[in-house]
Amino acid sequence: MAASTQRPQRAPHRQQRGLARMELILDAATRVIEERGYERMTTNAVAAEAGISPGSLYQYFSSRQDIASALWGRWSVKVQAIVDDDALTLPETSLGEVVDRVVTPLHALKTSDRVFAELYARVSAADPCLVDQADDQLHERLVAILATRNPQMGRREISTATSIVEGMFSAIVTRATLTGDPGTDLIEMKRAIVAYLEARGIH
């Protein structure tokens, strides 16, 4: 009796195609939000933008909120990538440079990117746990960076200082402008953050 031959596994290929289709849908959703705003980001609009049927979309995302949560996951990865920079912990990297390399891109995301701003507002209201989780991860990474740079200081003290800095940042980005020029706002905010941390003995 001839030995049976096994067919090659196709699951990885199907999985890759599925991931590619999800990315296609999320790219389409991003374009819809950019062009029409979050309120018009319906599953039908996203399916049309992606060039697929609504039924095909529902194989991957069950609702508009499901799409928004997946998009938020994308942005959370971008935020984490900003602070996952080993240079931030090096002693030769000045505190001013650390603040600049973290605050400038985060400020751009939260103030200049329409999709991020709308998702942050909508996901915060609909599923605050997702936003809280991302904020907690960012907080812990910032604490880890400053703790590495300041091994003589207690982690609780650094965590408290980091929370204050995060509050300073939020107070700026939630306002249209304080000085009349967003660029000046950003410069002054970074100066204030550096001065505060230095006053706390954090370098």
Image (spheres, rainbow, N blue to C red):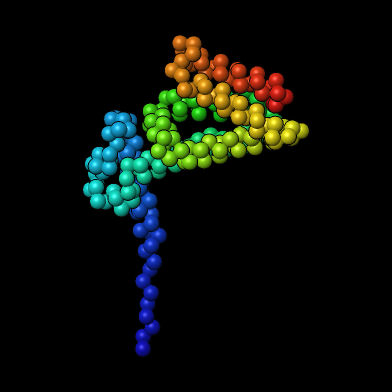
Residue 119 in view of the camera: no
Q: Residue at x 38, y 83 (%)?
A: 3
Residue 171 image offset from top left, x and y in percent: 52, 22
Residue 83 occupies quadrant:
top right
Front one among 28 and 36: 36
Residue 93 image offset from top left, x and y in percent: 65, 28
Q: Is residue 101 left or right of residue 128?
A: right
Residue 74 occupies quadrant:
top left
Outermost residue, top side: 180
Q: Residue at x 44, y 24 (%)?
A: 111
Looking at the image, how many numbered discs can be counted on the residues?
0
Residue 167 image offset from top left, x and y in percent: 56, 25
Outermost residue, bottom side: 1
- The quadrant in which the C terminus is found is top right
Front one among 31 and 85: 31
Residue 97 image offset from top left, x and y in percent: 61, 25
Residue 198 in view of the camera: yes
Q: Residue at x 40, y 60 (%)?
A: 12
Q: Is residue 154 left or right of residue 189?
A: right
- The quadrant in which the N terminus is found is bottom left
Residue 75 occupies quadrant:
top left
